[in-house]
Image (cartoon, rainbow, N blue to C red):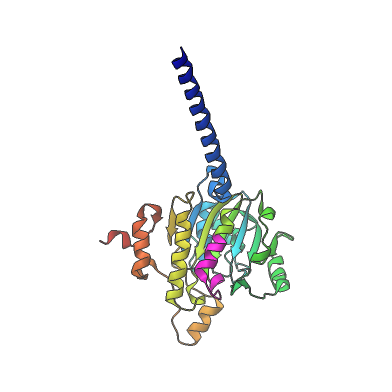
Amino acid sequence: MTCGRTGERIVRRAVRGARCAALLLCCLLVEFTPRGALNEGAPVGAFLSDNHAGHFFYLARLLEPRDSYCLLLFDAHPDAAPLPGRADVRRRLQDGKPVEPGRIQCYNWIHGLTPAPIGDFVWVPALSAGTPVPYDTRRFEIAISAWFPKGKATAVPFDRLDRRRLSGKKIVVSIDLDYFCRSQNPARDIGEVFRFISHLERVDCIAVAVSRPFLPDDDFADRCVEAALRELLRRPDVPTIEIGVVGPGIPDRSKRARELEAAGLPVPGWDLDRAPTYLKELVRENRKRFLLGASSILRKP
């Protein structure tokens, strides 16, 4: 009888210990798992393209057209130019018809997605040695007010970006790598931006534009792409990273591209097939998480 009671006590203590351990584990998971990584169990879309214009085609396909999302744009430029023939472009999208290459540019791609599905717009200006580059807020407000609802577009430096103001919104993150081109440590600052994103309440997708003409050289572009891809791969809620899948080859008509052409220089672009070996190996090692479209690197030994 005594042995039976002793055994029961041992079992009860073991059960209580297991329950306490499980409760502690749950508390630790809640405390240390980023809010964005949980994301209510929903997968987060991820996309990388050479040009910001590709984000237009990606988001037009991904987002619910009648829903409202907040665009959180990390970029050296606000991309606030109006889109010529916007009504026709939106009709074509709604009818499932193709949009001619060149109509969507890196400086006007946002306009075609407003007022729905993009209903709010927060532009985070570029960094310089870890601090915001001076920018003309008034000029941005004037440019955006021509076509964006009043009070729905703001410019906020990274050090004043408040997660609480983004609470309750469906966030679409767009990161232009020229945001980091004045940074003394781009990989560190890319990680800082992704850490901020990981604590947002809800993120529906993260799209990255290389914007090679605005970056100093190919090596800088490749290192930034590597840092961004590694950050995306760290997120368990990102099942697939698409690279250059959506959107046709789009001729660049940006001011920077025109300056290069006027000087008789080629307009550089970024292409995974021409990327250095270390970047291709990163993709091959994680092949199950990439969707590469026309790229042939996964078919090569």
- Location of residue 278 by image quarter: bottom left
> Which residue corresponds to the image point at 56% horizontal and 54% vertical from the top-left?
198
For residue 86, side relative to residue 228 (left or right): right
Verify whether residue 33 appears in magenta: no
Residues drawn in magenta: 178-194
Q: Position of residue 25 (x, y in %)?
A: 52, 40
- The quarter in which the C terminus is drawn is bottom left
- Location of residue 26 by image quarter: top right
Above or below, 65 against 141 in this view is: above
Q: Position of residue 46 (x, y in %)?
A: 48, 56
Q: Is residue 252 visible?
A: yes
Above or below, 187 against 93 in this view is: below
In this view, the residue farthest toward the front is 2
In this view, the residue farthest toward the left is 301
**Predominant secondary structure, magenta span:** helix
- Location of residue 3 by image quarter: top left
Verify whether residue 192 appears in magenta: yes
> Which residue corresponds to the image point at 37% horizontal and 55% vertical from the top-left?
286
Q: Is residue 86 visible?
A: no
Q: Position of residue 292 (x, y in %)?
A: 38, 59
Above or below, 139 against 167 in this view is: below
In this view, the residue farthest toward the bottom is 263
Tell which of 178 and 230 is nearer to you. Answer: 230
For residue 230, side relative to residue 256 (left or right): left
Tell which of 291 and 26 is nearer to you. Answer: 26
Q: Position of residue 141 (x, y in %)?
A: 72, 68
> Which residue corresponds to the image point at 58% horizontal and 75% vertical from the top-left?
129
Numbered disc total: 0
Tell which of 44 and 5 is nearer to you. Answer: 5
